[in-house]
Image (cartoon, rainbow, N blue to C red):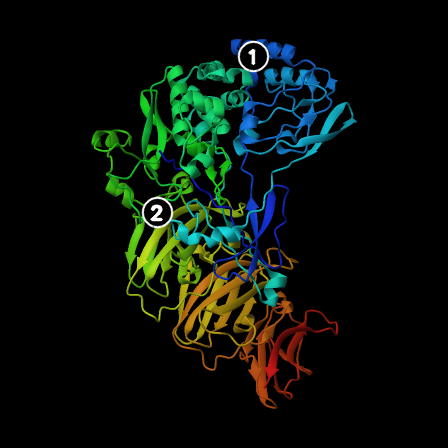
Amino acid sequence: MGCCISTRVHPIEYISEIQQKKTSPNESVIKFISIEDRESALEVSTELQCGEANTKHDKNIENTEVHKGILSEAKEIEQLTKGQTQPQTLEDRRSGRLIGVVHTTEEEGDETKYKGDNEGLQKTDNLEEKGILFEVKEIEQLTKGQTQPQTLEDRRSGRLIGVVHTTEEKDDETKYKGENEGLQKTDNLEEKYKNADEHQSCKPETNESEEIIKERTDDYDKKNYIKDDRFDEKLAFSETIRKETKDDFSAIELHASQAPQAVLKSVETLVEYLLKLTNSEKGKVWAFYVWIACNIQYDMESLVRERFNAVDAESVLKSGLSVCGGYANLFEEMCRVAGLSVKVISGFSKANGYSPERPFTSTTQTGHAWNAVLIENSWRFVECTWGAGYKDQSGEFQKCFSDFYFLTDPKHFISAHFPWKSGDLEYCNKWQLLDHPITLEQFNKMLKLEKNALMWDISPLSHTEGVIEAHEEVDIVIEDKMERLCSTGVKFYNCKTGKSFDEYTFLRRENPKTIAVSLRPPSNGTYQLNVYGKIDQLEKSHGQLMSYVIKFSNVTTDSNPYPFNHGQMWGMSLEAFENGFQAADRYNIPTKLRSENGYFDLKLNTTRNLPTIARIEPATKQLPGDKRRYCLVSGTDNELNIRACFPDRDLYKLQVLCQKVEGDEKYHEMAVFLIDCTKPADPGLPYPTTYSSTQKYRCKLIEPLEGQLPVNSSVTCRFQSPLVLNAMVAETKMKQEGNEWWATVTTPGVGEKFRISGNISDENTYYGLFEYDIV
């Protein structure tokens, strides 16, 4: 039986030219050639490390009978290991991990302290205080020339324990220094993309995350613009189980992670060891789930060659390697030994290689297996395979523990799992564990929601099926019931070519609970839309929420793109309201605006005077000159005013960038609006150039608004400012009437400077406010 596993693609980060991501010791930088432009060399940051869980042991275990049993076992190990080198464990042989060699230890009182460079060894722990006396006794005897035990976090993520090369003694502590090997690897992404058309989905391996990148090329962006946002799946260990029960599962979890080699002789001896700290049904199941997910490696080689090794429980335990059937069989046998009612369920899964265009049928061979276990008189799902890790972009299985697939809610589980036994409808209905079971046809049509969407309660409103038939344009609406998403993004691809068409997407939040994306591709064909989101502003990655296949027909040739926005959300960002914009404007100002005369005047409420730059970018036309010259910004302590001029009939992106704090040399994107200009401005000339003093002195230009003035002509210049004390235009002093300054002068010759300047003191130094071109 083939086996389906979950797939995750490492992210390609948004990288601006002026803020390159620093590579940490656990990241590698990969160069590749994109599908769209194989001549463009782009940098990729691949995260190789998963989140860690808190694994503190319950201190109160010290006085328990179970604890006494552990001490007895520890004494046996003392006799076996005294003066010897700790043998490499089965788990280490399974995963190919190295165990760091510890050269010396020093005892201080009743405590032994350990330090190392690896994440699993970084902090100095008082292990006895945690109640891990078994491990302490073991470590105290493993002295010169012996090995450091592996932590639960390392077991979960498949990390290597660093080889210890040197030791240094200081203040009665022994510090261990080492370096990790094998933590970093460089993938040839170009080769992976060459085989894109061989995959069932539109773009290679896009089940759980997507690869995106943007380049910024104009000189201003290189110096001043920052936008670092990328898509990926956050795999940090969640606290689902802790919230679900008052049981202290951390102690069980830690105990399971420390199972010694001696108890792996049989399923019975392993179960006996795992159950030392728990008598509850849920605790037993949790111990089995943790041990299997952290210790059984997925057999990718068998999956590729489609010749599978034995998947019975004892064989899997002995080899430490299997496909989904082996995971399920081992879990079943462990439950049986513990006296729990359990069943192996076989069926279909929407995982690796799944495509909604290729539905499962009654003749399709089932390719996946999982378990159902009876806990507290209720059947619950356990999916050890998907809880153990995922298949990465190169086709390798990456160990990465997740508790989402432990006792998963049936209404969530049905999104990707369907029990199937040919000709047995009762089996199919019963093992969905739903009050109202669905049919195989409904399962095929139903949109697959990714793990993040299920955890965050994100669901489709407008289109609940994975395949959409559309004509020229389609609007897809998603519900964020709990208002948890702080950022959303999309990627839009042609399924046949793999080419990105993000510029044909318009993503926005229409109200606190509703997100919408409009799609209008340039031609007929089948496209894939991937939707991403995150719930933490500090996170720099997005997790995939869902994916649609959309078949467009009757698309007209005059379908124009939207201005390119990198597949990101239009409108005001949450960051804007933390940096001077008033939250009341979030939904009061529409994301899409309209100009019927070529001009637009936008007013935003603020809590302080914000140094701001605004610029426009058309969807199809080219702007002559600087994009910023078509926007004129003025502001006060409580209002930001942006005037825009649109020289052509087109869709425009109006981008608002601000300094976060006074003195900040960089401008950060705070809002992006879509402007539909139905009639060009007349004459459609750019505004005059402005300077930092323009906003600092609260200047608002009244006339002339056109940035180009004819040579040797009479012109009246007028502006307002509550702060300016002296003002000049060219070499002529301006007159003051209240807050208004004005003067009538003659423009100079072609190419000469014509500038309005001012100051806010009696000094003779004047600062530029507005500058015009003389033509």
Crowd around label 2: few <14 · some 14–19 · many ≥20 (10 Å): many
Report the residue at 66% width, 23% height from top: 147
Report the residue at 31% width, 69% height from top: 556
Quarter occupied by the N terminus: top left
The residue closer to the viewer here, 520 or 476, is 520
Q: Position of residue 764 (x, y in %)?
A: 75, 74
Q: Would residue 182 be found to the left or right of residue 684 on screen? A: right
The residue closer to the viewer here, 723 or 288, is 288
Mark 2 vs mark 1, CA separation in Å: 50 Å
Q: Position of residue 5 (x, y in %)?
A: 41, 37
581 to 253, vertically: above or below: below
Residue behind mark 2: 355
The residue closer to the viewer here, 640 or 536, is 536
Q: Residue furthest bottom?
A: 712
Quarter occupied by the C terminus: bottom right
Q: Is residue 145 visible?
A: yes
Q: Would residue 426 be found to the left or right of residue 669 on screen? A: left
Q: Position of residue 10 (x, y in %)?
A: 51, 46
Q: Is residue 742 visible?
A: no
Q: Would residue 29 be found to the left or right of residue 456 on screen? A: right
Report the residue at 54% width, 52% height from top: 13
Mark 2 secondary-structure assignment: loop
Q: Which mark is residue 70?
A: 1
- Closer to the eye: label 2 or 1: 2
Q: Position of residue 290 (x, y in %)?
A: 47, 26
